[in-house]
Image (cartoon, rainbow, N blue to C red):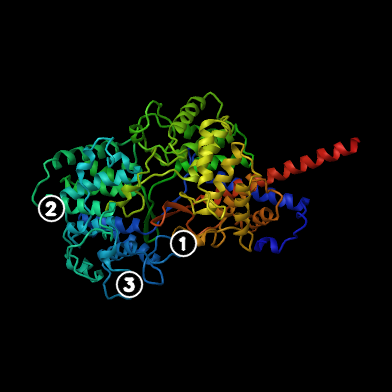
């Protein structure tokens, strides 16, 4: 018995009295009005997307590299960094998490650039923690490049990122299109940085030599070799050693050609009007600016000003602080808001629905992006995550928009039908050979690539995962796809094969097992899977077992490092909503656990009609980078309340019909 059910009557379902129904409807209506009030002037939604402090730190490091250490934004970003320092002296990649070495080193370095002295108490605490974590030499590959461009360690201590890789054909196992889209957009500009090896010399007062346990000039491998005589790690480390030797003796005859092609590749994917910067995400935009400086492009050049303008668009100034978003999430937020509004009864022909639908349709992808290198014979379609990112539509956003159009009652209307057909065809074509779906590309699953020295950011691949695969199933179900059809059956087999022993599913794009289990249960139910089977009942049992005593659900990012922490954490509105949506899909509307979860949401709703939520419940790269979607505690709880309310109406209707039938006889 769960903690929640221990306090409830085990033999009877709590009565659905009128007061309860009114309270439920009132809470749902408040949430719907709150959601509608958050619309932008043109009808779309976009909440803040919050990451950890590497964003502010790297922005300060970039400004220092560009010779702008005296920029007023440095002080404001430093103010934000000081606010985020933890009691252990370091900085974490999610609130409440342990101090992380790369995050902490970059924050410390940024504060040194802002003028903080190494003997200040908060800096001494930070340095002590960094030493305990292995010193600045223990940072990851990307952090080392920041240290190198600012003269804190030599490039020989960084992993080689050979520009020549862009010359390799697609049939070659290690070509640039064999890595994930987000790694690709970082790797290509970073390879140019590695080729030029630019350095901005900082004043001695800004140096961070005190963070190193050993001399930063001491030669070292960019990663540790394994004990085996042959391993892929050792193989790539050997290549790294050879590349450094070739560079030292200028034995790189293809380097100039490769660099020119890499720069052209980068610029093609960051055209104004097509993209909010390369990949439309913070890290490659920063490297774009570093590349331009390395190429000698002046600060007054329109391209440099445009690139830096994309970073300005990600900045949020509040009081004396400055923080940055990793990107913006308008397509994602608008699709989910549409679903929430429609679930709560917003009419299909209302201005709120029709303008949001048109806003999404206007952002359909109609050009072939990187995905087309490996997926042939399908017309471009689908949607991306940000405002403009035409080279990188993704499966998750495309699936969510298809769901939104269907639930909002617009999928079969003339204005949407062509885009819907293209998106369905594109979505099916993106299915991996193993039956699942990844995010941006098809079959990016060569695990050998995770052994290269610069792949320590845990994001080199884009493998199929249960949560996206199940969401693809849910979206296709709205357009007639069911069990018995080949794409569905392959996807179901993939998903069932990824179930954990506990009964849960791993969540790649949300924290974590609660997220994955919710989406799989919804996806299976949508395509007509038998929800009474043991595989489903195990998942239901797991969700009930991890329910908190307050009726809610929660899970920390810690579960990515320690799976024994799956489903454990303080209750949050978004994770409670996910658990409820999963249980409702599994036919558990009348369970005491669902009732307790709904009561938790109603009891924690604030005066504005939304919910307060501090923990990060979104995932960028597991174990490396996490996210807080500020609109998650708005539309997800609304969906849960609205669908629960609908289940109660359906239950009452069934009861009424039975009573009428009984009275007839």
Residue 623 at what x, y percent from top left? 40, 57
Circle nearer the N terminus (2, 1): 2
Residue placed at 62% from the left, 36% from the top? 528
SS category of the residue bearing label 1: loop
Instruction: Tell whether 492 sits left or right of 296.
Output: right
Disc 2 residue crowd, few under 14, some 14–19, many 20+, Cα 10 Å: few
Asked if disc 1 and disc 3 are in contact, CB closer than 8 Å, the reply is no
Relative to 444, residue 486 above or below: above
> Regarding mark 2 in the picture, which secondary structure is present there?
helix
Taking the spot 38% from the left edge, 43% from the top edge, the residue there is 445
Q: Which mark is residue 562?
A: 1
For the view shown, which residue lies furthest in the left direction?
249
Q: CA distance from mark 3 to mark 2?
A: 33 Å
Q: Is residue 415 left or right of residue 122?
A: right
- Which residue was labeled with disc 3? 132
**Screen quadrant of the C terminus:** top right
Residue nearer the viewer, 456 or 333: 456
Marks 2 and 1, how far apart in space?
40 Å
Label 3, residues with CA under 10 Å away: few <14, some 14-19, many ≥20: few
Residue labelled with disc 2 = 245
């Amino acid at each position: 018995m769960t903690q929640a059910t221990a306090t409830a009557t085990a033999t009877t379902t709590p009565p659905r009295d009128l007061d309860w129904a009114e309270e439920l409807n009132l809470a749902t209506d408040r949430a719907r009005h709150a959601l509608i009030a958050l619309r932008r002037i043109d009808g779309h939604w976009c909440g803040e997307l919050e990451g950890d402090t590497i964003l502010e730190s790297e922005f300060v490091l970039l400004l220092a590299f560009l010779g702008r250490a005296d920029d007023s934004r440095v002080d404001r970003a430093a103010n934000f960094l000081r606010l985020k320092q933890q009691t252990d002296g370091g900085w974490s990649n999610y609130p409440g998490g342990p101090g992380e070495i790369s995050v902490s080193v970059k924050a410390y370095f940024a504060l040194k650039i802002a003028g903080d002295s190494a003997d200040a108490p908060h800096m001494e605490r930070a340095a002590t923690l960094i030493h305990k974590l292995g010193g600045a030499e223990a940072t990851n590959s990307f952090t080392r490049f920041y240290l190198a461009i600012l003269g804190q360690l030599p490039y020989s201590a960084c992993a080689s990122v050979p520009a020549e890789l862009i010359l390799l054909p697609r049939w070659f196992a290690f070509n640039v299109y064999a890595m994930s889209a987000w790694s690709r957009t970082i790797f290509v500009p970073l390879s140019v940085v590695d080729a030029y090896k630019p350095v901005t010399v900082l004043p001695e007062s800004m140096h961070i030599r005190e963070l190193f346990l050993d001399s930063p000039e001491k030669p070292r491998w960019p990663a540790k070799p394994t004990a085996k005589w042959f391993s892929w790690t050792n193989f790539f480390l050997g290549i790294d050693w050879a590349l450094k030797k070739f560079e030292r003796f200028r034995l790189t005859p293809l380097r100039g050609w490769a660099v020119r092609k890499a720069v052209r590749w980068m610029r093609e994917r960051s055209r104004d009007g097509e993209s909010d910067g390369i990949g439309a995400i913070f890290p490659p935009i920063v490297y774009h600016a570093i590349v331009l400086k390395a190429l000698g492009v002046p600060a007054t050049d329109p391209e440099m000003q445009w690139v830096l303008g994309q970073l300005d668009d990600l900045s949020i100034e509040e009081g004396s602080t400055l923080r940055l978003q990793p990107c913006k999430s308008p397509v994602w937020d608008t699709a989910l808001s549409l679903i929430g509004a429609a679930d709560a009864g917003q009419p299909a022909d209302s201005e709120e629905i029709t303008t949001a639908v048109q806003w999404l349709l206007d952002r359909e992808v109609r050009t072939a992006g990187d995905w087309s290198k490996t997926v042939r014979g399908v017309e471009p379609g689908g949607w991306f995550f940000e405002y403009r990112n035409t080279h990188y539509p993704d499966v998750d956003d495309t699936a969510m928009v298809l769901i939104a159009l269907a639930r909002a009652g617009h999928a079969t209307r003339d204005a949407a039908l062509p885009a819907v057909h293209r998106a369905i065809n594109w979505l099916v074509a993106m299915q991996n050979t193993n039956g699942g779906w990844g995010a941006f590309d098809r079959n990016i699953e060569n695990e050998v690539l995770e052994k290269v020295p610069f792949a320590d950011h845990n994001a080199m691949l884009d493998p199929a995962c249960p949560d996206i695969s199940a969401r693809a199933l849910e979206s296709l179900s709205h357009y007639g796809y069911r069990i018995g059809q080949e794409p569905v059956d392959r996807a179901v087999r993939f998903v069932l094969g990824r179930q954990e022993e506990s009964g849960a599913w791993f969540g790649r794009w949300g924290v974590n097992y609660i997220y994955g289990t919710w989406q799989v249960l919804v996806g299976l139910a949508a395509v007509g899977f038998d929800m009474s089977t043991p595989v489903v009942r195990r998942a239901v049992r797991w969700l009930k077992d991890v329910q908190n005593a307050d009726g809610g659900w929660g899970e920390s990012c810690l579960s990515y490092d320690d799976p024994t922490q799956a489903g454990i954490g303080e209750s949050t509105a978004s994770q409670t909503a996910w658990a409820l949506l999963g249980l409702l899909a599994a036919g558990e509307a009348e369970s005491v656990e669902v009732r307790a979860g709904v009561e938790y949401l109603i009891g924690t709703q604030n005066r504005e009609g939304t919910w307060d939520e501090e923990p990060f419940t979104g995932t960028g790269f597991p174990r490396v980078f996490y996210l807080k979607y500020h609109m998650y505690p708005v539309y997800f709880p609304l969906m849960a309340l609205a669908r629960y309310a609908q289940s109660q109406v359906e239950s009452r209707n069934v009861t009424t019909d039975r009573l009428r039938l009984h009275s007839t006889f």
